[in-house]
Image (cartoon, rainbow, N blue to C red):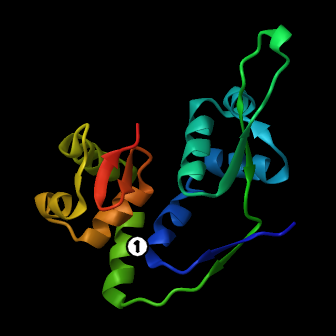
Amino acid sequence: MMRVKVVNDSIDLIPLLRAFEDDVRKNVFNEISNDWKTSSEIKEKYGEKGVEALEFFEKIKLVETKWTTPDPKSGERPDKMYRSFYSAFNINISCSVNEISEIFTVASLDCERFRKLENEIYEYVGENGKFGNDVAEHFDITTLALKGIVKRSDRLIFRGLRVERLK
């Protein structure tokens, strides 16, 4: 069955552009496009980066998940399984030049610079999180840039109007 992911919000381009940024993410996505795979199968083949890829795909809602139910007598633990939810993308956005330039700037930040900024935001929001506008103001960035950074991050998430730690 063909499912199409419709992207009509410019901010959703950022995680999509980063979803396949390296060979591990690309290969993991190709594997889960074909069939259900457990996190332990992916970890065995791709290591911890493969598991991180699965978690990122789950955060940006590119995968569906379910739990295995092993035989209780075997002593095995349940394992999370992943499969690609979409087989195609339909991107249809309209936005200002300023907005798209902000989006491409956040999406193309080099990994080292992005991780530094992500870590600073992570520390700033603390255990309880902070309102997004306060975070953007503190770091002297636009709320659009903050939304993009959070969308790209695998450690931060927006819950309502608050930026919170994911892990």
Q: Secondary structure at mark 1?
A: helix
Which quadrant of the view contains residue 73? top right
Question: Residue 51: horizontal and vertical position, in percent?
Answer: 60, 36
- At x 18%, y 45%, the residue is 124
- At x 40%, y 73%, the residue is 104
Number of marks drawn: 1
Classify residue 24 as left or right of residue 14. right
- At x 82%, y 22%, the residue is 70
Asked if residue 109 can be seen in this view, the reply is no
Q: Is residue 160 above or below residue 65?
A: below
Classify residue 14 as left or right of residue 69. left
Question: Residue 9: horizontal and vertical position, in percent?
Answer: 48, 78
Classify residue 30 as left or right of residue 154. right
Q: Quadrant of the C terminus?
A: top left
Asked if residue 150 can be seen in this view, the reply is yes
Q: What amino acid is labelled 1 in the image?
A: Phe
Question: Residue 120: horizontal and vertical position, in percent?
Answer: 22, 45
Q: Quadrant of the N terminus?
A: bottom right
Residue wearing tag 1:
104
Q: Residues within 10 Å of mark 1 (few under 14, many from 20)?
A: some
Name the one closer to the observer, 93 or 125.
125
Q: Is residue 97 above or below residue 86?
A: below
Question: Residue 97: horizontal and vertical position, in percent?
Answer: 35, 89
Name the one closer to the observer, 1 or 109.
1
